[in-house]
Every structure is written in C-alpha cells, then in structure tokens.
Amino acid sequence: MRQYHYDVKQYPLAGIALKSVQKYYPDVKDLSLLHEHVPTKKIGELAKIIGKDLADGCFYVIFDELIKDHISLGEILVQRFGNIRINIPNQDKDGTVLPFHQGQWVGNGLGLRTVWLPFTDAYDSNSLQIVNLMDSRAITDACKEWDYLRLQEECKKSCEPVNLKNGQFILFTQEHIHGAAPNRTGKTRMSVDVRLLLKDGQPHRKWPGAYFRKLGDTDIHSRKVEIKEDDNVVMYAEYEGFKTRYIDLHFQTLTVKDYCNRMGYTFPHQTGDNEGRRHTYLEYLIQEGNLNHIMMFSIFSLPDDYARRVYIMRLAVALKVKLHFANEEFVLDSWEMLDKIEYLRNFTTDWSNPVYESSNMALARNE
Ligand SMILES: [Fe+2]
C-alpha cells in the first residue's frame, strides 16, 4: 500500500464533489457534515447521482492528470466510473457497514490496483479499515474453513484505519483485505475509489472497454450516434468469442436492450451468426445486408483472431455500416475508433481467475 500527496489547488477534486452535492443539497457547506442535511435514506441515491455527475463533468479530466503526474505503473487503463462512497456516522443503525473483503473475491483480477481518495478527512472509524498485505495473505490462506463471522472477526483484529486528509490518496492491491467499522467519529467521510489495470495484468471480471477506459480518454459517455428513421438496424448475436461463448442470447439481448433504452434507440430486429462459422454471417451482413447499423453485445463479440477482427472492422468502416457495442457504449464509425477498440482488446491476454488459478501477475512480496 502506498500513500501519495497532491496539491488540492491544482487538482480540486473535493471542491468539485462538494459543488456536485450542493446542486441537490445547497445547505451542505462541509462534506463532513453532509449527514446533517441529507436524510439517511437518501444517501445511497445521492452517491449514485454524484457518481454520474462527476463522470459528466471535468472531474475525470483532473483525476487522470493526477494519476499521470503521481503514479508510475507504466501503461494503465482506468475504471470508467469510479465509486462514490458516503460513510455517515452510525451507519450500522441502517445496516450499511461495508463487510471485510478483498478485490479478488469481488471479481477483480490481480492486475488491478485501487486508488482510494477521500474528499473529507478520513480517520479512525469513519475511514477505510485495511489489513496489511502479509496478514491479508495469511487470512486468505487460513479462511477457507472459516464461516463468515469468523472471517469478519479475524479481519477486525488485524485491520487499521487509513488516516488521510483531503490532498492525499492511497493505492492498494486486490489482495489487501479491507472493510469499514461503525462510524463513531460524528463526521461523514466521503471518498472515491477508482481501479486501474496494469498492462498485461489480469482483469478477471472487469473488462477493458466496458469497465476500463484508456487513461486520458475521459469522453466517458460515448457520443450518441444518430440513427435516422429510415436507417436499417439489426441486433446481431454470436457465441464465438472466448468471452462471449457463455453469454447466452437472453443476456446479450438484455445488454443491447439496456443500451437502446439509455441511448433512446428502438430495439431492432434480432439476428445472429451460426455458431462455429467464424462470423461469416456478420461479414455478409456488413457487405450485403443493406444495413446502416449493427448492434452487438461487446467488442469481445468480434472475432478473437486479430487478422479476422481487423478485416471485419475495416469492412464496416469502409462500407459505413456502424457497429454498436452495447457493453462498452462504443460505436465503430471511424479509423480512430478502430484503433481504440484494438488497443483495449490487446491490452492484456491474461484471462486467468485469481481465485481458482494462479496468475503470473501475482504480486511481489514487498508490494
Ligand atoms: Fe473493496
């Protein structure tokens, strides 16, 4: 775990968060007293709204600069939407104490790192409670036979609060066990946590493109591409990809339907490829399908084979058939987008599972 300091004037992240809260609760002058103005039952909703607002504004432009200027982990991807946490006093009364856990138990691969950055003073029981790496590993090894409560108790014994002020953040690994305690400080702690993915790192369930974006690519909400009334549109499903092989039609459909709802598109006619036929129907649809738009589940619905994938994408761009990728909210309509999709698809090849398989991205003992 590493701690960093930054200049709050140059990177006014907490100020942006406060302004965002004030849009909904103008009486909040100090985020640590937020609980005096926001009803307890509205806290969860507020955290979600603020998360969206920050993604729409300049927050991540500044955040990415902060990361570039302070962290040297080589080439990295950044979580598309950070998580906003609002930890009010006595949150145990409402049953919202964060249990102890670690990243690899919640779908994060070992190639991820977590940036944890408070907007308020974070201290004692209002802060994140974290177990050092050595003890985290010992607990992980020992806990296989423990029940849930025993795990929580053992973590409580070894954890320590992260004491930080506005202008500081920490970076920790997916092996660090962490959680929260009942907040008895009388002060609200508000923070953001944003995951990073190392080049060639193990992402596990957090896919480049949908969950991760390129560092500096803060156009988080994709440009909405116009679909004209007389445009021909289909949804296309396939099961050829190493990631999409087990995403059955129902789930691909739900993702595309959700994308259509968000973008205000009508859900189109549905079609799909023949399993085992190497996307030949997609190739035909682009060339001779008389279509303007083809919607599919993900950039991982494209062929896994590099040459075949690039051929299909080039064909679509050249023939002006727009490919929509619902999970990522991308539309392939330019050579630039083709490059972006390739960058994300090639960012890592380590698709092992940190819980059941060993990975070459396991951390050095001293990290
Ligand atoms: Fe966590």
Image (cartoon, rainbow, N blue to C red):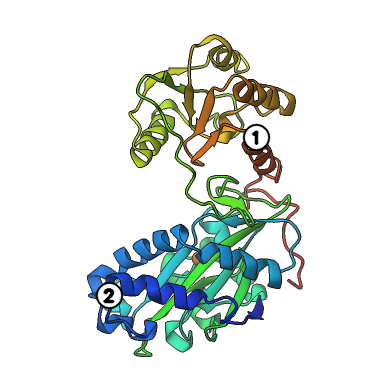
Q: Residues within 10 Å of mark 1 (few under 14, many from 20)?
A: some
User: Which amino acid type is marked by label 1?
Assistant: Leu
SS of the residue at dot 2? loop
Query: Is the residue marked 1 within 8 Å of ligand 1, measured from its CB?
Result: no
Where's residue 168, x and y in %? 59, 81
On screen, residue 217 above or below 349: below
Can you identify the residue that label 1 sits on? 338
- Asked if residue 98 can be seen in this view, the reply is no
- Asked if residue 84 can be seen in this view, the reply is yes
On screen, residue 88 above or below 222: below
Can you identify the residue that label 2 sits on? 25
SS of the residue at dot 1? helix
Quarter of the figure with the C terminus: bottom right
How far apart marks 2 and 1 lie (CA) works out to 42 Å
Q: Residue at x 47, y 70 (%)?
A: 100
Q: Nearer the viewer, residue 265 or 169?
A: 265
Q: Are marks 2 and 1 in contact (CB under 8 Å)?
A: no
Q: Residue at x 67, y 26 (%)?
A: 309
Where's residue 156, x and y in %? 48, 79
